[in-house]
Image (cartoon, helix red, strand yellow):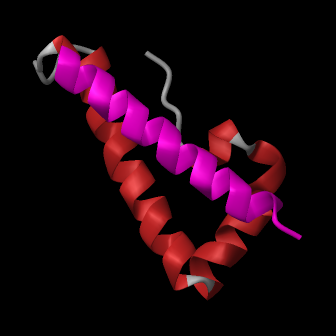
Amino acid sequence: MERHDLVHEFPEYAEKIHEMKQSDAHFRKLFDEYNEMEHEVHRVNTDTEVVTDGHAHELKAKLLFLKDELYAMLTKE
């Protein structure tokens, strides 16, 4: 199963992601939360971790919310 880390999701922002992780504490916090959530969703999707369908849906919704928030920060001028 394919991973969905932020750099692979937004390769055009790879350099900016790196810069913002270093200079923006809020971005770094959200980035770390996104990575943790992405790892958990990956474990669920590969049946490494068994959860209810409702919990899996909740995890994916949170991951999408974080991704949208991080994208908004990356594209903000």
Apparent side of residue 55 relative to residue 50 in the rendered image (left or right): right
The main secondary structure of the magenta stretch is helix
**In x, y percent, where is residue 4?**
53, 33
Q: Quadrant of residue 22?
A: bottom right
Find out whether residue 65 is within the magenta segment.
yes
Apparent side of residue 30 relative to residue 22 in the rendered image (left or right): left
Q: Which residues are magenta?
A: 54-77
Q: In the image shown, does 62 or 27 lie closer to the viewer? A: 62
**In x, y percent, where is residue 74?**
75, 61
Which residue appears at 43% of the width and 39% of the height?
A: 63
Q: Quadrant of residue 48?
A: top left
The quarter of the picture where the C terminus appears is bottom right
Apparent side of residue 14 relative to residue 67 in the rendered image (left or right): right
| Total marks in image | 0
Find out whether residue 14 is within the magenta segment.
no
The quarter of the picture where the N terminus appears is top left
